[in-house]
Image (cartoon, coloured by chain):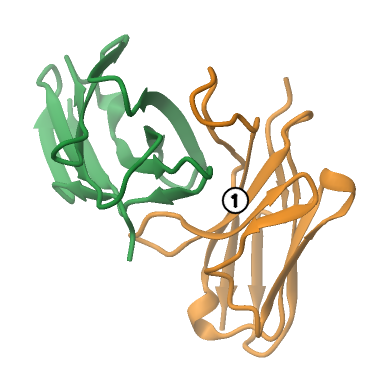
């Protein structure tokens, strides 16, 4: 089974609202990454947070990591219709092994 | 900088036929990954190469799937014979290899994928 599990599976919001999605994992990690996938396209890297970091920002994205709870969250502020996509977390071990979750499908309505 | 190239973009075959996918990673990227993504699911790692050596192929169905990375650059993934459940998008990704703790991590750059339909 996948190590990373995203929650919720689907999220629908209005443009301008914030979107929060969560990722839980099971084993120790070196870092955790979030990716976006537009329909029919490849994945695009959004942000990487290391196991010794607790929070990271990139533009409208904010990622938190709680290694004690083995969980991470991705917050997208002031969402836009163009943010409509699937979002995946990927956990990476010290050996460089990556494991993706099944993603959260975000729909931002204009 | 050119991205990860994959071909073909689409392939339709009948079950029990063979198929091959090609990937050209970003120049200088030592690590290459092949993923299988079934509709509605996340990418599942099939095989990971470090240069031309295999790092992880624990989820590769070796009775029908094979992959190689010649000279540590391009890679091909083959399925022989194909089954209906192999219908999926096959994604190739590459990354700079970075031991734990160093800057850069292992951000992966993905190609557009090959959509395989097995009839």
The color chain A is rendered in:
green
Which chain is indicated by disc 1?
A: B
Residue at 25%, 25% in the rendered image: A81
Residue B16 position in % (x across, y down): 67, 90
Residue A10 position in % (x across, y down): 17, 48
Q: Which residue is mark 1?
A: B113
Residue at 76%, 54% in the rendered image: B53
The one of A4 and A97 positioned closer to us in this rendering: A97
Residue A47 position in % (x across, y down): 39, 23
The one of B8 and A25 positioned closer to us in this rendering: A25
Q: Is residue B77 above or below residue A64?
A: below
Q: Is residue B32 above or below residue A34?
A: below
Q: Quadrant of the N terminus of chain B?
A: top right
Q: Residue furthest top?
A: A59
Residue at 28%, 15% in the rendered image: A56
- SS under mark 1: loop
Chain identity for the colour orange used in the image: B
Is residue A83 shown left or right of residue A36?
A: left
Examine the image and state in which quarter residue A35 appears: top left
């Amino acid at each position: 089974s996948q190590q990373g599990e995203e929650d919720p599976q689907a999220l629908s919001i209005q443009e301008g609202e914030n979107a929060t999605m969560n990722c839980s994992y099971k084993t120790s990690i070196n870092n955790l990454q979030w990716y976006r996938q537009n329909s029919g396209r490849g994945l695009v890297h959004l942000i990487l947070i290391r196991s010794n970091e607790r929070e990271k920002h990139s533009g409208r994205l904010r990622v938190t990591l709680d290694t004690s709870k083995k969980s991470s969250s991705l917050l997208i502020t002031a969402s836009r219709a163009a943010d409509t996509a699937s979002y995946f977390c990927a956990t990476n071990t010290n050996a460089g092994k990556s494991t993706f979750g099944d993603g959260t499908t975000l729909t931002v309505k204009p | 900088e050119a991205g990860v190239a994959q071909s073909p973009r689409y392939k339709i075959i009948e079950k029990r036929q063979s198929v091959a996918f090609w990937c050209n990673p970003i120049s200088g990227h030592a690590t290459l990954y092949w993923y299988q993504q079934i509709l509605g699911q996340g990418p599942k790692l099939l095989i990971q190469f470090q240069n031309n050596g295999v790092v992880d192929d624990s989820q590769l169905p070796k009775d029908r799937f094979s992959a190689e990375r010649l000279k540590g650059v391009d890679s091909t993934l083959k399925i022989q014979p194909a089954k209906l459940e192999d219908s999926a998008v096959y994604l190739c990704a590459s990354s700079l290899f970075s031991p734990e703790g160093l800057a850069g991590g292992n951000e992966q750059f993905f190609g557009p994928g090959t959509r395989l339909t097995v009839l």
